[in-house]
Image (cartoon, rainbow, N blue to C red):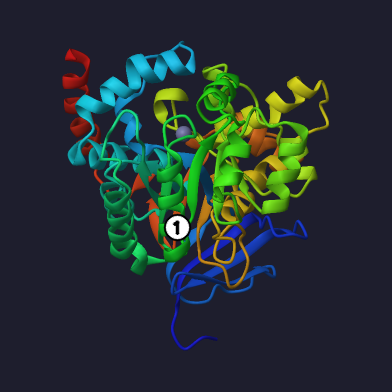
Amino acid sequence: MPDTPYDILIYGGTVLTMSEDGRIVKDALVAVRDGKIVSVEERAPKEPLPEAVETIDAKGCVVMPGLVNSHTHVPMVCFRGLADDLPLMDWLNNHIFPAEARFVNREMVYAGAMLACAEMILSGTTTFCDSYFYESAVAQAALDSGMRAVVAQGFIDAPVMEGNDPGKQRAVADKFADRWSGYAPLLTPAFFCHSPYTCTPETFRTVKEAARQARVPYLTHLLETKEEIDIVRNRHGKAPLEFLVELGVMDEGTIAVHCEWLAEDDIDTLARLGVKVAHTPESNMKLASGITPVPALLRKGVPVGLGTDGCASNNDLDMFREMDTAAKVHKLVNADPTVMDAETVVKTATLGGARVLGLDRWIGTVEAGKMADIIIVDMNKPHLTPLYNVCSNLVYAASGADVLTSIVNGRIVMKDRRLTTLDVFSVMERVRKIAFDIARG
Ligand SMILES: [Zn+2]
């Protein structure tokens, strides 16, 4: 017996560890102390439970790693439903960029991020990777709501948000990394160059240099639409990936988001350079921008995580819905129902995402030694009965609303669907007030 009680004990559930050996433990006992998973074991019948501060009965539930949303722009929840059913460039240039120029400020970013954190916790996400402006306000919201996050300060040259002078950009980047680097691995600072069609070569180089020095992740949208290839070719005489490779910004510290229009040899290039990919199928489908060749990327060993993208192009942050879509869309476009099986999809949403974010040492599986980022999913529901295959039910039948309890870093942030870290009604009210102004234009 330990000297001190455990912080949390979860008993009676089926643990989907998502470890490399695919271990599933029935009638398990998961013990958590000091933010970490101490043990995951089968519990002998009628064995008395050890002492713990919090004991959770998970009978009829699946206990699994918290979901990792590997790409989003959380403050964009404020633009949810503002402009739908448009092509990307029209949507961006005539709706989103103008709304951002008028309404994005620290208050909007914090309020939106708190609403997004509520939505993510309620739907089983425990880690998110965000890229936006005023990212310090997102970092604060992540800390206040108790979520794990990679927070990437955004850089963009057109339209101008926060200045495009390389000296100023470098100062902004260094200050941001400095301010947030002490919270790892709960919070990881990062940098985000919006895209090859909105950032100059100087911006890409300057921000990458800052990322290398601070040893933090570096992100960019890449090859989201076919049109991007023509825009970048006309401006720089090269295809987008070639442009970035020649700038020297593509390496194992880089996360390329979207990547729908990869040529066959582009996949080899990403694999060779160690670049990671964040896959956002619902956003790509809604904007009809294309589909990432995920089965081919996985075959070549490129780490792939799953993400929702921002709420203006999805329009929700429910990773269960995203898993369902990811499983089905690749079958359709490949005319092959055997690709992206349910287990592969759950992996992209857990350990795969953790690898993409460089956090797989700490999270992504329910195993002893990992940080306790755990969700408990109630399978005792009509739409989840019977239960032949856990991953099948999670991907094809469950939704975020089936998550009962969420634990991040050993802290219970939702218990029996009640959020413990924030007042969801006041958070919604704050965003409704902001939306009232946005709607008036
Ligand atoms: Zn995005």
Residue 71, percent from left and from top: 49, 41
Quadrant in which residue 388 is drawn: top right
The image shows a total of numbered marks equal to 1
Pointer 1 residue: 209
Residue 164, percent from left and from top: 30, 41
Label 1 C-beta lies within 8 Å of the nearest ligand 1 atom? no
Secondary structure under badge 1?
helix
Q: Nearer the viewer, residue 353 or 395?
A: 353
The residue that appears at 27% across and 27% down in the rendered structure is: 100
7 vs 233, left or right, is left
Query: Given the current orientation, which residue lies at the most extreme front position?
Result: 237
The residue that appears at 56% across and 19% down in the rendered structure is: 227
The answer to whether residue 387 of the structure is visible from this angle is: no
Residue 99, percent from left and from top: 27, 22
Q: Nearer the viewer, residue 123 or 307?
A: 307
The answer to whether residue 400 of the structure is visible from this angle is: yes
Q: What amino acid is at disc 1?
A: Glu
Q: Quadrant of the N terminus?
A: bottom right
The residue that appears at 41% across and 16% down in the rendered structure is: 91
Q: Nearer the viewer, residue 432 or 334?
A: 334
Residue 132, percent from left and from top: 35, 40
270 vs 436, left or right, is right
Image: 23 above or below 404: below
The residue that appears at 28% across and 32% down in the rendered structure is: 160
Q: Quadrant of the C terminus?
A: top left
- Assess disc 1: are there few (<14), some (14-19) or many (≥20) residues with their C-alpha within 10 Å of its C-alpha: some
Q: Nearer the viewer, residue 76 or 120?
A: 76
Query: Given the current orientation, which residue lies at the most extreme bottom position?
Result: 3
